[in-house]
Image (cartoon, rainbow, N blue to C red):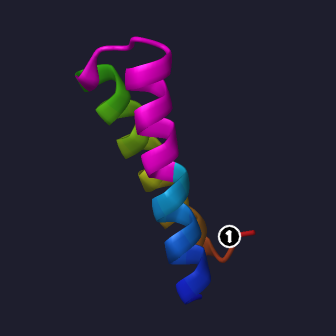
Amino acid sequence: MIDSYHDCNLRLRRKYYRMVLKNNKKTNVAKTAVARELACFMWGMITGNVA
């Protein structure tokens, strides 16, 4: 389970930096996208659907 937390953290950081630095998205747009992905990850943990 610890690995899934670490993997989630890496995925969210990569997503944020890719959106901001590579795709020139505004920081608030990137933060919202990361927050949505984090919420989905947490929902998956609660329901047992984490890969």
Q: Measured from the top left, where is residue 15 in percent x and y?
A: 50, 38
Q: Which x, y percent locates residue 3?
A: 60, 82
Residue at x-position 49% and y-position 19% = 22
Q: Is residue 37 above or below residue 7?
A: above
Q: For the point 43% across and 53% down, which residue is it?
A: 39
Q: Dividing the picture into quarters, in which one does residue 17 lie? A: top left
Residue found at x 51% / y 59%: 10
Determine the secondary structure under disc 1. loop
Tell me the quarter of the image containing the N terminus: bottom right
Asked if residue 20 lies left or right of residue 23, the reply is left
10 Å neighbourhood of mark 1: few (<14), some, or many (≥20)? Answer: few
Q: Main secondary structure of the magenta part?
A: helix
Residue 31: % across, % down = 30, 34
For the view shown, which residue lies furthest in the left direction? 28
Question: 44 above or below 31?
Answer: below
Q: Return the residue nearer the eye: 21 or 1.
A: 21
* Residue positioned most to the front: 21
Establish if 47 lies above or below 1.
above
* Outermost residue to the bottom: 1
| Residue named by callout 1 | 50
